[in-house]
Image (cartoon, rainbow, N blue to C red):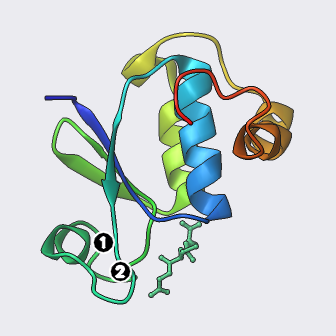
Amino acid sequence: MKQVKVLRSRPSPYVFRVEWALELKGVEYEYIGEDLFNKSDMLLKYNPVHKKIPVLVHNKKPIAESAVILEYIGEKKYFGGEEIGMLDLAMGWMTASFGVSWSSKK
Ligand SMILES: N[C@@H](CCC(=O)N[C@@H](CS)C(=O)NCC(=O)O)C(=O)O
């Protein structure tokens, strides 16, 4: 079982940015698809205030709000690797979402 999960739904620019940051860091993660018209108990539990995706779950700890998630992923202490630049985050997910450079996930 993977330690990192992303509650997501497509298409969502917020989710793309988070997934792109994980790809840049080389972090393996599991997708958990959400039906935003019928939100799961997991989403309601992990993001009880806003009830929105994305939510990152790392070692059972939920983190909501894409900007907060990106900051968390960028921190060396959690996932190591290189620091992620703002340009990578701002632009990278666009190419990824069009299938230009997405490495392992289609
Ligand atoms: N400020 C949030 C916005 C996230 C957001 O708006 N997510 C949308 C999908 S793109 C959502 O979950 N909508 C469901 C709803 O509003 O009930 C973030 O940056 O994570």
For disc 2, the neighbor class at 10 Å (few under 14, some 14 to 19, many from 20) is some
The single residue placed furthest to the top in the displayed view is: 81
**Which sits in the foreground, 37 or 23?**
37
Q: In this view, does 47 lie to the left or right of 11?
A: left
Which quadrant would residue 38 be assigned to in this image? Answer: bottom left
Left or right of residue 104, residue 64 in this image:
left
The residue that disc 2 covers is 51
> Which x, y percent locates residue 81?
55, 10
The response on whether ligand 1 sits within 8 Å of label 2 is yes
Number of numbered discs? 2
Q: Is residue 74 visible?
A: no
* 24 vs 65: above or below: above
Q: Where is residue 51 in the image (x, y as percent from the top left)?
A: 35, 80
Mark 1 → mark 2, Cα distance in angstroms:
5 Å
**Which amino acid type is marked by label 2?**
Lys
Q: Is residue 2 left or right of residue 18?
A: left
Compared to residue 71, the image places residue 77 above or below, namely: above
When asked about the image quadrant of residue 66, the answer is: bottom right
Q: Is mark 1 within 8 Å of ligand 1?
A: no
The percent coordinates of residue 47 (x first, y second) are 30, 72
Q: In which quarter of the image is the C terminus?
A: top right
Amino acid type, callout 1: Asn
Q: In this view, does 20 lie to the left or right of 92?
A: left
Q: Is residue 81 above or below residue 66?
A: above
Tell me the number on the disc at residue 47: 1
State if disc 2 and disc 1 touch (CB < 8 Å).
yes
Which quarter of the figure is the N terminus placed in?
Answer: top left
